[in-house]
Amino acid sequence: MLYDAESIYEEVKTILESKLMTVTFDTWFRDLVPVAVEGKTLILQTDKPLAKDLIPMRFTKDIADCFAQLNYEDFTFKIISPDEYDPEAQKKEDDSLHALTQKANLNPRYTFDNFVEGANNRLAYASSVAVADYPGNTYNPLFVWGGSGLGKTHLMHSIGHHILKNDPAKKVLYVSSETFMNELINSISNNTSTKFRDKYRQIDVLLIDDIQFLGGKEGTQDEFFHTFNTLYEANKQIVISGDRPPEEIERLEERIRSRFKWGLIVDIKPPDYETRVAILQKKAKINELNIDLSVLSYIADNIASNIRELEGALTRVVAYARLTCPGKNIDVEMAREALKDFTDSDSQKAITVHRIMETVCERYNLRMEDMKSKKRTKELAYPRQIAMYMCRKLTDVPLANIGKDFGGRDHTTVIHACEKVTEDLNGDHGDELRRSLEDIERRIVGE
Ligand SMILES: Nc1ncnc2c1ncn2[C@@H]1O[C@H](COP(=O)(O)OP(=O)(O)OP(=O)(O)O)[C@@H](O)[C@H]1O
């Protein structure tokens, strides 16, 4: 749970105001300044020396009742005088925290405060907060998966910030699995493997992004396996993200896959309309942009699948308005004009063979040439068959044309692909395949 002194005191004040006589409330509570929450203690500041002594004596029970009523479990309060709260010391603390977050590789913008909770990410958000509150003691490892641009990285960084804020002595490190691999390779070629191991095995909180990248990288998987074991056995927190659940990551060793399942696996889905609007409102507020709700709704209505694109659309609308109509308030007409290329073309939304091929390539980490090439290795042939199956399922394009788009293949190849996938769906690993196909379909239709 995350606490903010101002909002807690605002709630407490509302209850106290209704319970106490006006004169009592005005004398003791109206001007108290909420300055911080330390652990579960709300720190309130007063410049009246009498208040500092008298409030704890006379009102402790009233305030405790407020906390209980508001479900702030085990909360207490402390009244301090202005000289006990030193903004200079606070600044120093902030500066050193900033240095720590830089060392941990954390983006200052990716905090829980800036994250919008919605139906699409509720479980991922709640478990991230739990992990951030009690690292190593709740869900370990926490595995967060979901499509591109849906907030996985943002959540991981938020966990890191929160832990450092609570305990600056904790060693936190965010790293992409690609960086992990590159550092490993460098350490091997520079004969610094021990240093590499020390670095990763002495961490308190390891946040490792885009784990699917490790698929097929045996050496890196081996190193990661040992790092994982060392950290896990020492009760250190591990948070992992991926673009798919562990069982769907190809060429990942079983011993690693099974460890990912020891903790909690949560997914993030594309946001619904209400969450998209809320995210845009948040972004506008953070950037101090005053934009009418009708404009934000228009953007949310037209950019549906990915939050990174949603942010891009907002930036585009703002830039367009500044350049073409400086000084004017942004209206829906300007937004429509600015986003013309995104929203006008039905081709953006239409499901085409090309779009299906692109999505499958992205899902299996292939290039477009691979889809069209003559090569028939298993790594290429099966995704190609899946793409053909999807074309058949999701478009009305004739088989011969589908075949042609896949590097000039015959329509019988497409039929064979569809039969093969259908057969596999009814086979032993049918459930796993069905989940993969559903994931691909979601990406294609941009749900
Ligand atoms: N719920 C949310 N509230 C506010 N901003 C969000 C939310 N989800 C995502 N974003 C923003 O969307 C952008 C993309 O998010 P992020 O980089 O975390 O996605 P990702 O899931 O890690 O994507 P990828 O797999 O492509 O790396 C970021 O700028 C992030 O701040």
Image (cartoon, helix red, strand yellow):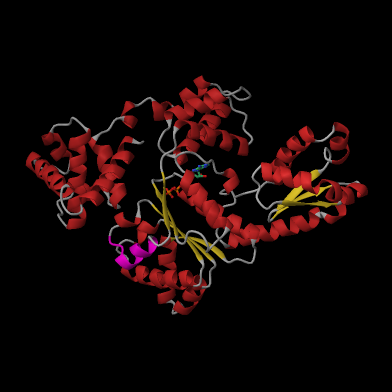
User: In the shown orientation, is residue 384 left or right of residue 312?
Assistant: left
At 57% from the left and 48% from the top, the residue drawn is 112
Spot the residue most to the left. 412
Please give the count of numbered marks on the rendered protein: 0
| Residue at 49% across, 35% down | 275
Q: Which residue is drawn at 43% across and 56% down?
A: 264
- Of the 4 image quadrants, the one containing the C terminus is top left
Q: Quadrant of residue 162?
A: bottom right
Q: Residue at 83% across / 37% down in the picture?
A: 30
Residue 105's x, y, as percent? Answer: 55, 59
429 over 204 or under it: above or below? above
Is residue 372 visible in the rendered image? The answer is: no
x and y percent of residue 123 in the render?
A: 47, 47
Q: Nearer the viewer, residue 110 or 318?
A: 110
Q: Which of 60 and 275 is in front in this view?
A: 60
Instruction: Give the side of residue 401 with respect to residue 328, left or right.
Output: left
Q: Which of 261 and 155 is in front in this view?
A: 261
Decide if residue 321 is in sight here: yes
Q: Where is residue 87 in the image (x, y as percent from the top left)?
A: 80, 53
Q: In this view, does 359 lie above or below 331?
A: below
Instruction: Estimate the x, y position of residue 419 in percent, counting from the top left.
Output: 11, 44
Q: Quick check: is 252 in the magenta stretch?
A: yes
Up/down of 161 relative to 116, above or below: below
Q: Is residue 425 above or below residue 103?
A: above
Indicate whether residue 388 is drawn in magenta: no
Q: Which picture quadrant has residue 224? A: bottom left
Please provide the residue range marked out in magenta. Answer: 251-260
Helix, strand or loop for the magenta stretch, by majority: helix
